[in-house]
Amino acid sequence: MLRLAPALLARLGRARPWAPVRRREAAAGGEEEQFVFLEYEPEPGEAAAATAATTTTTTTAAAAAARREREPGKKRRQRRSVVGTPDPSVPPSGVSCSGCGAELHCRDGAAPGFVPAEKYRTLSEGPAGVAGLRGAVCQRCWLLAHYGRALRLRLPPEQHREVVSAALRRPPRHGRGPLLLYLLDVLELPDPVLPQLPALLGPDVPAAGLLVVGNKVDLLPADSPGHLGRLRQRVAAACAEAGLHGAPVVDVRLVSAKTGFGMEGLISRLQRSWKCAGDVYLLGATNSGKSTLFNALLRSDYCKSRATDTVNRATVSPWPGTTLNLLKFPIINPTCDRIFRRQERLKEEATKTEDELSSEEKKYLKHLKKQGYLVGRVGRTFQQLKSSSVIDFDPDMLSYSIDEDPRDSPQKHEEREEFTHNEVKDARWCFDTPGIIKENCVLNLLTDEEVKLVLPTTAIVPRTFILKPGMVLFLAALGRVDYLQGEKPAWFTVVASNLLPVHISTLSNADAFYEERAGQELLKVPMGGKERMKEFPPLVPQDITLKGIGPTEAVADIKLSSAGWVAVTAHEEEKLLLRAYTPKDTRLVLREPPLLPYISTIRGARIAGTAAYRTRKPPSLVENLKTRERR
């Protein structure tokens, strides 16, 4: 988010925390409105990343050069050659990366599982041999976890599907096929990968059941009472439309793997119906949150209690396709005694108020409330949580400059706990599989910095505008909606990442404005100036005709690929002719009925002299916590 200048802040005075700041930019002979909302300013760490990401290419290069000159010599050497050194003569290890599941090696820096040769030798040439690599992570996971940086890897979509398909076609273990837990992002409904599921499974996959989980419900505000029930119905309808009528769909659940909402209920459902009858596979599209769900289950009552100390967490990143192979943890056997003890814990926790929580729990709960509208508390019945250890990956050993020879540094060997044969010989496992890549998705066109801005990671604050015929709405430089014909003004509510700017223009100025501003700081994404836009696909139009329902209920959502959507609300029987744009070869969807039909009512008063309304953020709801009585 752009930080406001001190002079502007002083001029604003005591502005309301939810009041947008209007700025006008002269472009193509007319005025263009940009709406910068104070509440969208991220935390300090996030702000630094966002600010760096939105700086123009020239400014970024100059600033980076200045910073490098001020850095100590060791840091400059690390930054210059962070990719490390490959050694094609060393055979693959046969050991999987504990973050993404890819086989560790040092042969090819562009292949999944790569570890710089210097670090690889340090780990594999010790007393334990290749076993010394157990628990290590590849360079890609290390950079994702520590710097939020994604390396471009040569991994075609067919390879993702091949890994998933081969895993599902394994012979049934314990005499029963696996349970398939399909995770979909509710923001992406209709899910683009769900229709591919029947073909992926095929007639020879011995699946015993399919449990569909809608994730990221914490990001969406409640537009009316019972909105979760309506979302659940939409997920069930998406399953039916995808041709899963004959599949054994055992249930549809809504969760937030990030904030924990619905997780305890999902675990209880799995233990009550599936028990420990067979393996469980997590399936879904890239960036649906599978690895986050995997980590949440790993730290819950669904996992063997000692597995927390022996199984590493999956790498979580906004970059699509983080998991490259199969990760797994052993499922706990839900005996009657364990089920009883777990239920007693849940009952006890449900009687507590927020004031009765420990200071650490309050602090964590406050953090989660900033992240989403729906929050849950995921606990452990059989073991206390331990603080997660930092992955030992020495930056000095990650890479070297061209004028410095590698030097071995003392390696700290820690005893790593392992499962005994008796503990896992009859175990049922929960597998995290690679995400299936979404075709015709705008995220496939973006850099990792741009993906961070486009994908929402905190509660989405809806932004509503009232437009007259002849007006245009831009969502960054990724989407555009033109109001071509209609007799009355209509309301357009943007549901997208809070970091993406919205601009209002006129039809006469829109083309020239996009030509001048796309790739620049004002529209944010894409970024990189004229050179970036030369390689970025042009926006392609699609005409849409709608008939209004009423001033409080949206008639449809215009989903601009994975960049977000615009909910359109119009007067009853009012006919609208719209033209929506997305980048060429990306998917534009007209979603009828809309996902949140009453989303336009979540707004404040109209801002005088503009097309915008003040924003309003509903309060967060904490699950499984007693509400404090008001006096």
Image (cartoon, rainbow, N blue to C red):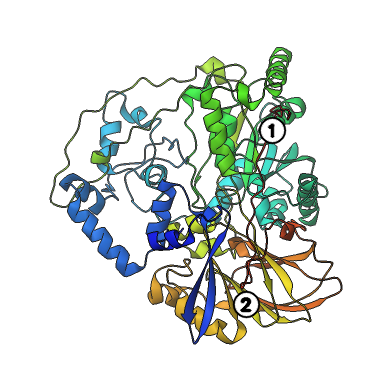
In the rendered structure, the answer to whether residue 548 lies left or right of residue 427 reads: right
| Residue 301 sits above or below residue 503 on the image | above
- Classify mark 1: residues with Cα within 10 Å, few (<14), some (14-19) or many (20+): some
What label sits on residue 472 in the rendered view?
2
**Which percent across, then down, holds residue 538?**
53, 77
* Amino acid type, label 1: Glu
Q: Is residue 420 above or below residue 547?
A: above
**Residue 534 picture quarter:** bottom left
Horizontal and vertical percent for residue 532? 41, 72
Disc 2 is placed on an element classified as: strand
Residue 475, how many percent across, how many down? 57, 68
Mark 2 neighbour density, 10 Å: few (under 14) some (14–19) many (20 or more): many
Q: Nearer the viewer, residue 483 or 535?
A: 483
Q: Nearer the viewer, residue 190 or 473?
A: 473
Going from N to C along the chain, the mark reached first, 1 or 2, is 2
Identify the residue at image location x=72%, y=31%. 265
Residue tagged 1: 623
Q: Nearer the viewer, residue 418 or 519?
A: 519
Residue for point 59% across, 23% down: 357
